[in-house]
Image (spheres, helix red, strand yellow):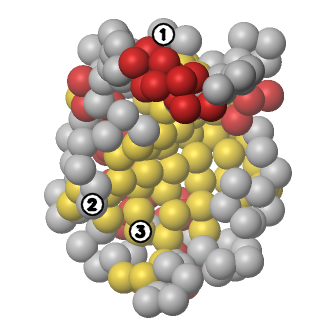
Amino acid sequence: VTFVFNFKGNLEKNNELLLKVLKTFRYTNPMPNLEDEISYTVPKGWTKSNPDTNEWLDFQSADYTVEPVGGSILTGAEIFVEKTKKDPSKTLTQQVSTESSFEASKIATSSATFNSMSFINIRFACNGKFGFCAETYSTENKGSVWTISISCGNDCETKGGLDNTIYTKDLYTFINSIKFK
C-alpha cells in the first residue's frame, strides 16, 4: 500500500501531523491465506515449499532440484498455485493468454474440465530460455482467477513430455482435489 502526501509550509510540523495520521491507519479486511479459500490434496511424495500465504502455494516433487545460480529446474517438477484479481473487461482466456509467462513459447490453448470446473489450459514449448516445460490451468471463482501451473526440468522431455510423465498424473490428481470454500 502506498500513500502520497503533499505538504506546504513547515516540513517538521507537517511530518508530525502525518505521523499522527498514519498511526490511526488499520487494515480492516486482511487478505485471507489461499488455504482459507481452497482445499486440496498434495500428491504423494510432494512437499509444500512455502509457508501459508495470500499470494501463492508452491509444491515440489520428491526428485526436485534446481541450479544453485539462476534457479532453473534440473530434475523433478514444481506445482504453483496463484490467485489474481479477475479483470472484468476481459474474458478468462484473454486474461490468462500470455505469450511467455515462463520464458517459453506458448504452443497451445485449450479447454479442460476437472472436478466439474472449467479451466483454460495453456501449454508452453519445452527447452525455452530456461530449459523447462510448462503448462497452466486457469479457472475463475468469486471475482478471482486461479492458475495452477506445473514446470519441470529437461527430464520431462526425455520422459515423454508433460503428457507422459509421472508428474502429469500428480498434477491431474492435485487439480481434481481442489475445492473452493
Q: Which mark is residue 77?
A: 3
Q: CA distance from mark 2 to mark 1?
A: 26 Å
Name the residue at 68% across, 45% down: 122
Give the structural element (helix, strand or loop) at label 3. strand
Q: Residues within 10 Å of mark 1 (few under 14, many from 20)?
A: few
Give the total of numbered labels. 3
**Picture layout, residue 13 above or below residue 127:** above
Give the residue at mark 1.
142
Q: Which mark is residue 49?
A: 2
Q: CA distance from mark 3 to mark 2?
A: 12 Å
Give the structural element (helix, strand or loop) at label 2. loop
* Quadrant housing residue 111: top right
Give the structural element (helix, strand or loop) at label 1. loop
Instruction: Identify residue type, mark 3.
Output: Ala
Name the residue at 53% across, 37% down: 147
Q: Residue 104 in the image: state x and y as whole percent.
A: 74, 66
Name the residue at 73% across, 74% down: 128
Q: Residues within 10 Å of mark 3 (few under 14, many from 20)?
A: many
Q: Is residue 1 left or right of residue 124?
A: left
Name the residue at 73% across, 66% down: 103
